[in-house]
Image (cartoon, rainbow, N blue to C red):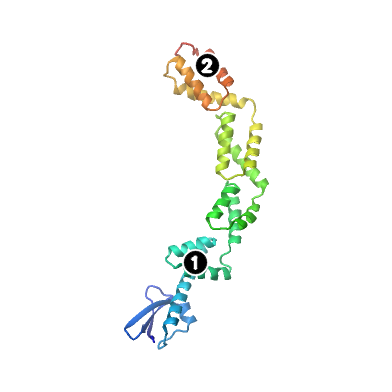
Amino acid sequence: MPVITKISVNKTLPNCYDIFFDNGEGMNSVTIHKNTFVRFGISKGMELDVERLQKIVFEDEVQKGFDRAAIYLSYSMRSIKQVEKDLLEKGFPPIVAEVVIDRLKEKGYVNDREFARSFVRTQLKTTDKGPLHIKKLLRDKGIDEKTIEEEIVLYSLEMQREKALYLTEKWLKKKKGLSVSLLKVELYSMLKRKGFEERVIREAIDEIVQSLDDGHNLEAIKRQGEKAVRKYRNSPPEIRKMKIKQYLFRKGFSVDLIHQYVEQLDEIEGMDGKDEW
């Protein structure tokens, strides 16, 4: 039966001890954490059968895994899946990671429900994301669907509406040159990417569109028209006119409004057969 012949503090790991023992076929050693050392009452001269030695080594791996997890959790709250992934990436065997997770749960160091609740609140305070996006992030972190659905209620429908409307108003300030039809398309795409629910998106777009006066499209076509005129300035007059119409049509303006705008250009700039502009 192996006998412990020497115990010394590990030079690179101050919280660990090097345990040397003679198994009858030569000297061997293991490095164990001081907590494991105390727990098993290890001392010089102690006899260790193979089963007990294996148990010591396993428990020591669990202790080291626990310490690693505690450090990882000290920076921020983590989901169980995140902690498990970190342990596996650090080289701990799956069975060790499983035992570590169980002990973390017992001590209340990991709790997916509390994590989900805190995560939703943080997202509400620090981001402009909608509930669907937040739910996806929680799934990626290993939170089960039941917990997600129960905690996402913190993101009330009224809060969604307020945030979606704020984003549409902010977007509108940067997109004054867009036609109403194209504006609706881009707003829908933006709010969809951010993870808002369909009904909230529709309500926000309807409200922002209703707030626009009749002059919005007139101002927008003027801005887009100026860009088109510059872009096709060097084209022959008739081709230029056609290209400008096509450009404005792609920007979502109605055929009637486009004709009206081009006619104004004809009158103001002498577009018919002339190259002044």
Q: Amino acid at mark 1?
A: Ala
| Residue 165 in the image, given as x and y percentages of width and height | 63, 40
Q: Position of residue 228 (x, y in %)?
A: 48, 23
Q: Which secondary structure, mark 1?
A: helix
Circle 2 residues within 10 Å: few <14, some 14–19, many ≥20? some
Query: In 3D space, how far apart are the residues under numbered discs 1 and 2 (Cα atoms)?
Result: 70 Å
- Residue type at mark 2: give it: Leu
In the picture, the disc for residue 175 is: none
Could you tell me which secondary element the residue under label 2 belongs to? helix
Residue at label 1?
Answer: 69
Report the residue at 46% width, 11% height from top: 274
Establish if 209 lies above or below 62. Answer: above
Where in the figure is residue 155, as x and y percent of width and height?
64, 50
Question: What's the mark number on residue 265?
Answer: 2
**Residue 132 drawn at (x, y percent):** 59, 48
Q: Quadrant of residue 192?
A: top right
